[in-house]
Amino acid sequence: MVKLFTQKPANIKLQRNNKIIERPLADYQANKTLWDFRGFKPVENVVKDNNEKIVELKPKVKNVKTKKTRSRGKKEIKEDL
């Protein structure tokens, strides 16, 4: 009996927005331009600082427009004459 040991291929995690996928490293290296075109980048373990200033935005002021009154129709003008 012969035992075969298979090695797991090295995987890489790719991220686009909030979506994270795992693909073989060989596949990523072969098709790197395609992955970049689709917006996937390798995941980096970077912790973001929460020291960013938060600016509160004022609500937009709506322009109040007055309704235009309809002009009288042709029939009403003829009747007045």
Image (cartoon, rainbow, N blue to C red):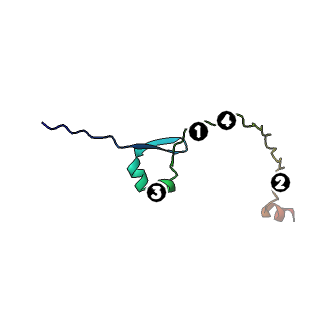
Which residue occupies 21% across, 39% down?
A: 4
Q: Earlier in the sequence, mark 4 or mark 3?
A: 3
Quarter residue 9 falls in: top left
Residue 34 is marked as 3
Q: Which residue is labeled 2 in the image?
A: 69
- Badge 2 amino acid: Thr
Question: Contact, CB < 8 Å: mark 4 with mark 3?
Answer: no
State the separation of the CA atoms marked 2 and 3.
59 Å
Spot the residue most to the right. 81
First in sequence: mark 2 vs mark 3 = 3
On the image, the x and y values in percent for residue 57 come to 78, 40
User: Which one is in front in this view, the residue at disc 2 or the one at disc 3?
Assistant: 3
Residue 53 appears at what percent x and percent y? 75, 37
Asked whether, in this view, residue 69 is left or right of residue 3, the answer is: right
Residue type of the residue flagged with mark 3: Leu
Residue at disc 4, secondary structure: loop
Distance of label 4 from label 3 (alpha carbons): 31 Å
Q: Secondary structure at mark 2?
A: loop
Amino acid type at mark 4:
Asp
Give the CA separation, mark 1 to mark 3: 24 Å
Q: CA distance from mark 1 to mark 4?
A: 10 Å
Q: Tell me the residue that label 1 is attached to.
A: 46
User: Between marks 2 and 1, how big is the CA–CA gap?
Assistant: 61 Å
Q: Secondary structure at mark 1?
A: loop
For residue 49, the mark is 4
Mark 4–mark 2 CB contact (< 8 Å)? no
Mark 2 closeness class: few <14, some 14–19, many ≥20 residues within 10 Å: few
Mark 4 neighbour class, 10 Å CA radius: few under 14, some 14 to 19, many 20 or more: few
Query: Mark 4 and mark 1 in contact (Cβ < 8 Å)?
Result: no
Return the disc, 4 or 2, that comes first in the chain's sequence: 4
